Amino acid sequence: MSEREFRNSTAIVGIGYSRSAAAPGGFSKNSGVSVMTLAVRAVREACADAGISARDIDGAITYQLNDSVLAEEVLRAVDAREVRYAATLFGGGRYSSSTTMMMAEAVSHGIVRYGLVFRAMNGRSGVRVGQFGVGSKGNRVGGPEQFTSIYGLSGAAVMYAIQARRYLDVFGATDDDLGAWAVNGRRNAIANPRATMRSPITLEDHRNSRMIVDPYRLLDCCLETDVGVALIVATAAEARDLRKRPILI
């Protein structure tokens, strides 16, 4: 399939969050429930948003850093009747878009009719970013991280600080350049009713925030939260008969 044929052939038809009475927006510092519960809540809301039954999902993909539940486990939990595709990737960051595109490809080729893309974790109260020592199954660190975590490379801020320091040195960027990025990010958050942080920050606030790992300060780092989020992907043709206006991919 060419890029021209693939473009706009699939769509996001539903989205859901792990809402509860304590966390109506889906995000919290302490969910009080298991990661599986967060995932299932998000999946059910996404299906309701799309106007389908969770049992109709026939494919799922997710990603994790030893902090979540497997795609096939969630498919069983929502009683999916016929599973044609299931994948759990190890990674973070760009994987939110990568997994969505992978599911869109599976849908466009007719492998999956209603594809689930989800991410769920107790990222604040449970396994926090950088805690490679103990994962969701109680396993010890393995893979390439076993050779880097012993030197303190155990989290996004630490690992990317090396690259950031190099960038600042080579291109002459400054701490205030990083600060401008953080200030703009908070400005965008304030415009988003779902965002957790609601107060504006200034360059002075950024300069006064404590150093985490050079050159990153506290206000350069993102929050860790407990949350589950899910998307439903279908073909553009299928989307026309569903509840919501689709977002074409």
Image: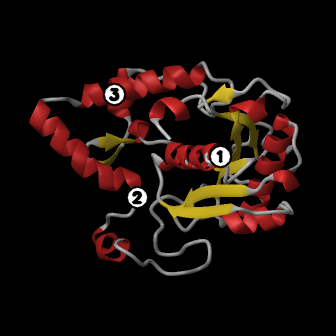
Residue underneath mark 1: 107
175 sits to left or right of 77: left
* Residue sitting nearer the eye, 143 or 178: 143
The number of discs equals 3
Q: Could you tell me residue 190's position as x and y percent? A: 59, 21
Tell me which colouring the rendered structure shows.
secondary structure
What amino acid is at disc 2?
A: Gly
Give the number of the disc on residue 155.
2
Separation of marks 2 and 3 at Cα, in angstroms: 21 Å
Which quarter of the rendering shows the C terminus? top right
Q: Could you tell me residue 209's position as x and y percent? A: 38, 36
Mark 1 vs mark 3: which is more N-terminal? 1
Q: Which of the two discs, 1 and 3, sits closer to the camera?
A: 1
102 in relation to 79, above or below:
above
Q: Residues within 10 Å of mark 3 (few under 14, many from 20)?
A: many
Mark 1 vs mark 2: which is more N-terminal? 1
> Label 2's element?
loop
Q: Could you tell me residue 208's position as x and y percent? A: 35, 32
Q: Which of the two discs, 2 and 3, sits closer to the camera?
A: 2
234 in relation to 140, above or below:
above
The picture quadrant where one finds residue 85 is bottom right
Q: Residues within 10 Å of mark 1 (few under 14, many from 20)?
A: many
Residue at the spot 77% in from the left edge and 47% down from the top edge? 18
Residue underneath mark 3: 179
Residue at the spot 50% in from the left edge and 25% down from the top edge? 186
Mark 2 vs mark 3: which is more N-terminal? 2
**Looking at the image, can residue 122 be seen?**
no
